[in-house]
Each structure stands twice: as C-alpha cells, then as structure tokens.
Amino acid sequence: MNEGTPRRKAGAQGRPDGRGHSSARATSVAPDGALASFRLDGRRALVTGASSGLGRRFAQVLDAAGARVAVVARRAARLEDLAADLHDAVVVTADLADPSAPGAVLDAVVEGLGGVDVLVNNAGTLVVGPAEDDTTFRDVVELNLHAPYELTRAAPDSPSRRVPLSVVNITSILARVGARSIPRPPTPPARAASSS
Ligand SMILES: NC(=O)c1ccc[n+]([C@@H]2O[C@H](COP(=O)([O-])OP(=O)(O)OC[C@H]3O[C@@H](n4cnc5c(N)ncnc54)[C@H](OP(=O)(O)O)[C@@H]3O)[C@@H](O)[C@H]2O)c1
C-alpha cells in the first residue's frame, strides 16, 4: 500500500487558477446549455476502484465535468496511467480490504485535494463459492461493505466541506438476489454418522 503519500498528476491542461477547467473532453460530457448545471467545477471527487472498468470511466467523466479527482485502487501503474490524462488528479494506492485503508485513504485525499465533495464507492469484487474460507469472506466484507461505510462515515465534515457530501454507491443485483444455489462440500462421514 501507499496510503498517506498522495501524488498529484498534472494533465496536459492543468488548472493553474484552481477555478475549474473546460476542455474538449469536458465539452463532450457537458456542453454549454442544457447540461451546464451539471458542471462540477471546484468540486473534489474520490473514486475507488478507478484502475479499470466502471471506476476508470467515472473518474474520467467527473474530471471532464470539472471536478478534481482522487483515484484509488491497488494497481498503481494503472492509476498513474489514468491520472496522466486527467487534470491535476491525485493517485492513492490502497488495498481497501485492509480495515485500516479507508482512514488512510481519506487522510491522503484530504491532503491532496483539501476535502471530498463527491464520493464514489465503486471498488468491489464478486466471489462465488462456499463462504467457508474465513480470509476470503472477511476480505469481501471489508471491500464491499466496510470500506464504503467507513469512507462515507469518516469523510471530512464541514467546515472543510464546502457543499454537502454526495455519495454514489455502486452495487450489484447480486446484493439483493442470489445468483444460484452454491453447493456445499460433502459432510465428513464421521460427523454424518454421529449426527444421525
Ligand atoms: N460490470 C458490471 O457488469 C457490474 C455489474 C454489477 C456490479 N458491478 C460493480 O461495479 C463495480 C465496478 O465493477 P467493474 O465491472 O468495473 O469491475 P473491475 O473492472 O474489476 O473494477 C474493479 C475495481 O475495483 C478495484 N479493487 C478491487 N479490489 C480492490 C481492493 N481490495 N482494494 C482497492 N481496490 C480494489 C480494482 O482495482 P485494483 O485491482 O487495481 O485494486 C478495480 O479498479 C464493482 O463494485 C462491481 O461489483 C459491476
């Protein structure tokens, strides 16, 4: 992990005046007119799981809408690659399955961005199998449940926050319905005999 040492990446079109940016990419997301009210200039956004997939795209869209973005995941090289295309992004490498990570991530993000206005709890994993491996079970609960809770709970409150915190939680339909029954391992003969 590399929490506590946020690194800023200045994109090709940095914002030296700190008052937001407008670029070709921003225009493609929020053109002048109908979508102008959706601009996020001056806002600070934290996106977990930004090294690939949906989180990477969320970070790009938030950046294009004018927010300064902190990108969080384990794969530092992928985050650095993403940050190189964003405006003055902050890279925080962390394993959010580590119970101490959310606090360290928030410390690093506040140091790098000065606060958090938009929190996107996107990092998550899907493990299908018997929940009898305690380490795997704990890691999934830490990443999918505890980390979003802790990031939301501990996100810095006013006066450091200039606007109410917006929280976006990315989840799965599998949080609500089972995909299929999961086969259990066969009962050992000794236990089967003693219980009959
Ligand atoms: N794509 C879908 O169809 C779909 C459907 C339902 C729900 N979702 C949910 O949407 C979210 C994003 O999914 P995706 O499809 O974009 O998946 P993905 O491409 O696998 O992205 C997952 C992200 O989470 C990060 N991550 C995983 N474990 C982590 C850990 N221990 N600590 C920190 N970061 C971690 C990964 O980065 P590193 O590996 O670099 O850490 C990666 O950036 C997930 O929560 C997923 O459950 C997606």
Image (cartoon, helix red, strand yellow):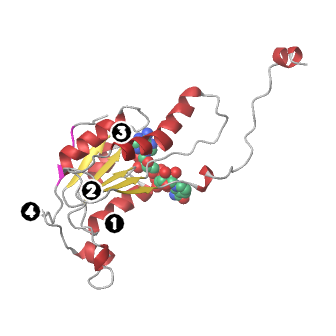
Q: Earlier in the sequence, mark 2 or mark 1?
A: 1
Residue sitting nearer the eye, 26 or 144: 144
Residue tagged 3: 102
Q: Can you name the residue that lies furthest to the left here?
A: 17
Q: Secondary structure at mark 2?
A: strand
Residue tagged 2: 69
Q: Is residue 112 left or right of residue 192?
A: left
Instruction: Report if the CB atoms under discs 3 and 2 are less than 8 Å apart.
Output: no
Residues at marks 4 and 2, CA–CA distance in whole angstroms: 16 Å
Q: Secondary structure at mark 3?
A: helix
| Percent x, y of residue 45 | 29, 56
| Percent x, y of residue 46 | 31, 52
Q: Residue at x 38, y 47 (%)?
A: 152
Alpha-carbon neighbours of circle 3 within 10 Å: few (<14), some, or many (≥20)? many
Type of amino acid at the residue the image marks with label 4: Pro
Residue tagged 1: 61
Looking at the rendering, which quadrant does residue 59 occupy? bottom left
Residue tagged 4: 16
Range of the magenta residues? 5-9
Residues at marks 1 and 4, CA–CA distance in whole angstroms: 20 Å
Q: Is residue 112 left or right of residue 94?
A: left
Q: Residue at x 22, y 67 (%)?
A: 41
Taking the magenta stretch, the answer to whether it contains residue 8 is yes
Q: Earlier in the sequence, mark 1 or mark 3?
A: 1
Q: Predominant secondary structure in magenta?
A: strand
